[in-house]
Image (spheres, rainbow, N blue to C red):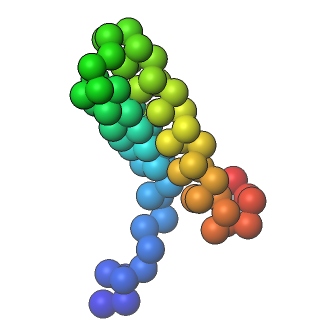
Amino acid sequence: MDDFFEEPKRIGCLIVPLAAVGGFIVVALLFAAIGLSAFISTTAGCIGALVAVLIAGKIFYRGKGGRR
């Protein structure tokens, strides 16, 4: 029963790809909803993905004491 409540050991492998996809989709749709061109929306989405990965990495590795 105690095994059910333990934290998964390999959850970190999903943080970077999910943050990148989520950041890209949110920012690209935001810029598309404003009415900007596809190129600008895609570029902003890529920047949003990069920022999301950096924030997720900082939050995730802060709890591990800086160890990777």
* Extreme residue in the bottom direction: 1
- Tally the numbered discs: 0
Residue 50 vs residue 41, the one in the foreground: 41
Q: Is residue 58 above or below residue 42?
A: below
Residue situated in front as seen by the camera: 58 or 10: 58
Splitting the image into 4 quarters, where does residue 3 fall? bottom left
For residue 50, side relative to residue 65 (left or right): left
| Viewer-proximal residue among 66 and 19 | 19
Q: Quadrant of the N terminus?
A: bottom left
Q: Where is residue 44 in the image (x, y as percent from the top left)?
A: 45, 23
In terms of image quadrants, where is residue 23? Answer: top left
- Return the residue nearer the eye: 4 or 15: 15
Q: Where does residue 54 sit, x and y in percent of width and height?
A: 60, 43
Q: Residue 61, position in %: x, y?
A: 64, 58
Q: Is residue 38 visible?
A: yes
Q: Is residue 15 left or right of residue 3?
A: right
Q: In this view, does 39 lie above or below 24?
A: above
Q: Which residue is drawn at 53% across and 51% down?
A: 56
Residue 17 seen in the figure: no
- The answer to whether residue 26 is left or right of residue 66 is left
Which residue ends up furthest to the front in the rendered image?
Answer: 34
Residue 5 % position (x, y): 36, 83
Q: Which residue is drawn at 44% across and 74% down?
A: 7
Q: Residue at x 50, y 42 (%)?
A: 52
